[in-house]
């Protein structure tokens, strides 16, 4: 009987080949990332929603990096407090800071604001679309008006700003646009229906802008953060069982393991924009959630449905339909540790309510 030669699988060689290819792709990506790097010194940066929270911290760090910074927000009193702080941070150099009251849902106001920034500081080199609204409550209590409001602020606002600054960026062949979306723009978060819908739209807009503007040297970064400790729940809008909704949302927003320090988040966002990265998802638990949902969308949705069952249910419509800001909700269901963190973050990030 004629002998046969057994062929052994070349698994080790294949593995090493794939590893080498992956390393090569990573090295090329890092080289391109370094080539896209910009310096913020002497750049003009415009941050919407820059009077408090993450927006204020981004403005602080841009100023520290040498940029000339413009911020806008709807509330004039909160905006003025932020402007005074930023001027002090700039060593009293008021010429480096501009604060403009502006409703980003109004395209006319946006164009006027951008024109003022251009006249005072110069053409916008870095746009950070951070302004947003969040409504919390059962779907049963969310109305068409809630969805329309979320779309006007979270989607049309960034669109208005991008349309206002992109032509000059294209003409110069350089620019950065940062769109702050959410992990709620990657998968639907229970009790955040209007918010998630509008943030999904913003992710699509942001990715589309990146594709179309890249050939002009303008890089668009989509940021999808999870929980951050900014003290923002007091500015969120709650419907349904107001106290219970405020309690779960505030507790999750401040949980040390799940939520992220705002200063560190701002630093990572500006690093991603500096290098023209396509997307940033943070913190790590949020990154894991997004990746899990991408791989197992059905299972992820089923798990979120289970989570939703543990949240407060709808109540009588005459109560649940009412809108309350977090600052007006007093809830003894919020743990003391979470309340203390919220109060500390509110002071740190200018979240105190205005006198108006």
Image (cartoon, rainbow, N blue to C red):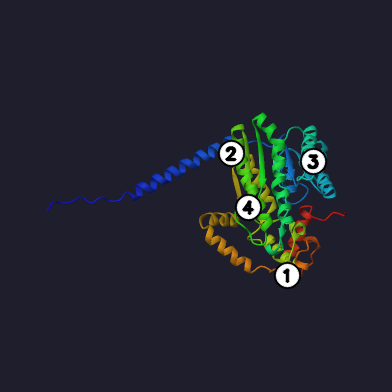
Asked whether residue 317 appears in the rendered view, the answer is yes
Q: Which residue is mark 2?
A: 211
- The crowding category of the residue bearing disc 2, from other C-alpha atoms within 10 Å (few below 14, some 14 to 19, many at least 20), is few
Q: Quadrant of residue 212?
A: top right
Percent position (x, y) of residue 129? 70, 44
Q: Which residue is mark 4?
A: 185
Q: Nearest to the eye among marks 3 and 1: give it.
A: 1
SS for callout 1: loop
SS for callout 4: helix
Q: Which residue is mark 1?
A: 315
Residue 8 as seen in the image, left or right of residue 46? left
First of labels 3, 2 by sequence position: 3
First of labels 3, 4 by sequence position: 3
Outermost residue toward the front in this view: 144
Please tell me whether residue 10 is drawn above or below residue 45 in the rendered image. Answer: below
First of labels 3, 1 by sequence position: 3
Residue 2 as seen in the image, left or right of residue 110? left
First of labels 1, 4 by sequence position: 4
SS for callout 3: helix
Outermost residue toward the right in this view: 356
Q: Which residue is mark 3?
A: 109
First of labels 1, 2 by sequence position: 2
Outermost residue toward the top in this view: 171
Gap in angstroms between the C-alphas marked 1 and 2: 45 Å
Gap in angstroms between the C-alphas marked 3 and 2: 27 Å
Q: Residues at badges 1 and 4 in contact (C-beta under 8 Å)?
A: no
Q: Quadrant of residue 96?
A: top right
Asked whether residue 129 appears in the rendered view, the answer is no
């Amino acid at each position: 009987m004629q002998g046969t030669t057994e062929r052994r699988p070349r698994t080790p060689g294949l593995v090493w080949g794939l590893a080498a290819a992956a390393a090569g792709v990573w090295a090329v990506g890092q080289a391109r990332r370094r080539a896209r790097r910009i310096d913020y010194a002497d750049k003009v940066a415009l941050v919407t929603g820059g009077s408090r929270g993450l927006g204020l911290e981004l403005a602080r760090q841009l100023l520290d990096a040498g940029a000339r910074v413009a911020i806008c927000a709807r509330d004039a009193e909160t905006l003025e407090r932020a402007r005074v702080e930023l001027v002090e941070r700039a060593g009293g150099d008021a010429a480096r800071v501009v604060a403009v009251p502006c409703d980003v849902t109004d395209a006319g106001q946006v164009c006027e604001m951008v024109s003022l920034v251009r006249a005072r500081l110069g053409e916008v080199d870095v746009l950070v679309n951070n302004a947003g609204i969040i409504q919390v409550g059962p779907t049963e209590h969310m109305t068409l008006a809630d969805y329309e409001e979320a779309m006007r602020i979270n989607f049309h606002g960034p669109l208005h700003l991008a349309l206002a600054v992109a032509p000059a960026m294209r003409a110069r062949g350089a620019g950065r646009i940062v769109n702050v979306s959410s992990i709620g723009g990657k998968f639907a978060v229970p009790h955040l229906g209007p918010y998630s819908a509008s943030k999904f739209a913003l992710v699509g807009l942001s990715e589309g802008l990146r594709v179309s503007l890249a050939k002009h040297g303008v890089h668009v970064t989509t940021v999808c953060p999870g929980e951050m400790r900014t003290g923002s729940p007091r500015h969120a809008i709650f419907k349904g069982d107001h106290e219970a909704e405020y309690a779960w949302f505030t507790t999750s927003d401040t949980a040390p393991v799940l939520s992220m320090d705002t200063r560190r988040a701002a630093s990572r966002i500006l690093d991603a924009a500096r290098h023209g990265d396509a997307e940033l998802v943070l913190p790590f638990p949020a990154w894991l959630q997004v990746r899990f949902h991408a791989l197992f969308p059905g299972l992820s949705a089923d798990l979120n449905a289970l989570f939703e069952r543990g949240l407060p249910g709808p109540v009588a419509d005459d109560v649940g339909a009412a809108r309350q800001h977090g600052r007006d909700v007093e809830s003894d269901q919020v743990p003391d540790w979470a309340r203390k963190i919220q109060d500390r973050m509110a002071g740190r990030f200018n979240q105190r309510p205005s006198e108006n």
